[in-house]
Image (cartoon, rainbow, N blue to C red):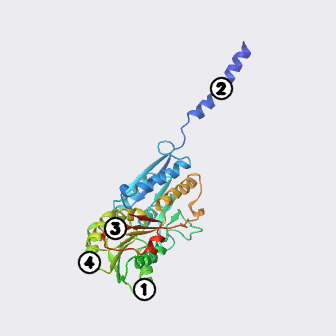
Amino acid sequence: MIKRRTLVGAAASLACPIASIAQHPAKVYRIGFLEGTSAARYTNRLEALRAGLRDLGYAEGKNIVIEFRWAEGRYERLPGLAAELVRSKADVIVAGSPPAVQAIKQATSVIPIVMVAVGDPVAAGFVASLARPGGNITGLSNINVSLSSKYLELLVAAVPKLARVAVLVNPGHPTHAESLRNIQTSAKTGGVMISPLQATTASQVEAAIGAIAQPPSSALIVLPDPLFLQQAPHIAELATKNSLPTMFWTRELAEAGGLMSYGPNLPEQFRRAASYVVKILNNAKPSDLPVEQPTTFELMINRKTARALGLTIPQELLLRADEVIQ
């Protein structure tokens, strides 16, 4: 009898720690997300980020919480939103554009930051080098600064006798000055006049497009920017009404009515960003994680918009397109 009680007691003592381990809640990580536009403009990218996290075993309501902050196209809101994420004690913060990275970089040098879709992170001062980022920032570059001269090349191929190209720039964007210089340098060899148009608000965007409207040999390059992403459908509509062929940086904007887009698949970049987040949650240091660059790029042509512009896209350019929207 004594032996039986001893065994039962021993079994109970062994069971207690096991039960206590089973009942101990798993750690829930807090992921911050900062962007200069609105959630409505980021649907595909957010779905891709969440899918990438789920594939790696991290899901909202299970072991992560994502704190979103959106500036709705207003740069002046970014510093305050960045400060909120720092106060929330996020384990890692994802920033989806250069202005967002710039704001969160100024807010913290401690919390790890995963940047996505940054044109030239070295020139912007976000990382020391692509191979060895240093500091608390790493992630993915979309190399749009390097691609900016390609925007001009494709417009020249699409629009016969193109003489003037307006470039919509936001003076507060960390990489627009470099992108504009690249376009201007390329234009010197092609005899195309470049007209920079500055805009920092929605009303200025509309006024800028109105300033270049009507000349039949003009076109518009819209550089990557949260404000311009927020206004993209309106920009595409205004440009078409004013007979302006447009070049955007991502396929969603060609789908929204722009004439063309050229660049990497941004939802795929956000899916890839999930691997950086998970590595950091597993104690990797951002300074040790090389910045990833895209290797494939998509050319999208909206033939419906071309017809509305009275423009016939050359067959050789259509054949180069990854997708033609009819």
| Amino acid type shown at disc 2 | Ser
Give the CA distance from mark 2 to mark 1. 83 Å
Q: In which quarter of the image is residue 188?
A: bottom left
Image coordinates for residue 325, horizontal then vertical, percent: 40, 63
The mark nearer the N terminus, 3 or 2, is 2
Q: Nearer the viewer, residue 94 or 43?
A: 43
The mark nearer the N terminus, 1 or 3, is 1
Q: In this view, does 243 lie to the left or right of 65?
A: left
| Residue for point 29% across, 64% down | 234
Q: Mark 1 packing: few (<14 Cα in 10 Å), some, or many (20+)?
A: few
Q: Which residue lies furthest to the top in this view?
A: 1
The mark nearer the N terminus, 2 or 1, is 2
Residue under label 2: 13
Q: Is residue 182 left or right of residue 22?
A: left
Give the CA distance from mark 1 to mark 3. 25 Å
Mark 2 touching mark 1, by CB under 8 A? no
Numbered disc 2: secondary structure: helix
- Quadrant of the rendering where the N terminus is positioned: top right
Residue under label 4: 214
Give the CA distance from mark 4 to mark 3. 16 Å
Residue under label 1: 190
